[in-house]
Image (spheres, grey):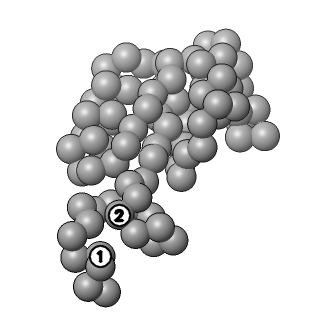
Amino acid sequence: SESLQNCRLPFRRSSPCTPVKLLIVEDEPALRTSLVEYLRQDGYVVEAAASYEQAHEKIKLYQYDCVLLDLTLPDGNGLDVVR
């Protein structure tokens, strides 16, 4: 539609011009930094967590459109974050 022409992708379909917010949960610093930088360059709003505890806290406080999750975190199971 015409109102979407001024939006910078990626945006939520249900809310035009509202960017997609992602949480990256990865304990390996180089991989986490690389993912965050790449996705931010593509226009995503990205937050990162390095541990189960950080991820759990962020999910309690904020809403994300998508969570990219490492399943083997040093302080907990990534699947427990999903639960």
Q: Quadrant of residue 47?
A: top left
Label 1, on which residue?
Answer: 4
Residue 66 vs 82, above or below: the answer is below
Residue 13 in sight: yes
Quadrant (top left/top right/bottom left/bottom right) for the N terminus? bottom left
Residue 44 in the figure: left or right of residue 23 = left
Q: Residues within 10 Å of mark 1 (few under 14, many from 20)?
A: few
Q: Quadrant of residue 19?
A: bottom left
Residue farthest top in this picture: 75
Pick whichever, 56 or 1, lies toward us.
1
**Residue 24 location (% of width, % of height):** 47, 34
Pick whichever, 53 or 45, lies toward us.
45
Q: Residue at x 66, y 17 (%)?
A: 53
Label 2, on which residue?
Answer: 17
Q: Which amino acid type corresponds to the residue marked 1 in the rendered image?
A: Leu
Residue 45 in the figure: left or right of residue 6 = right
Give the SS element for disc 1: helix
Q: Which amino acid type corresponds to the residue marked 2 in the rendered image?
A: Cys
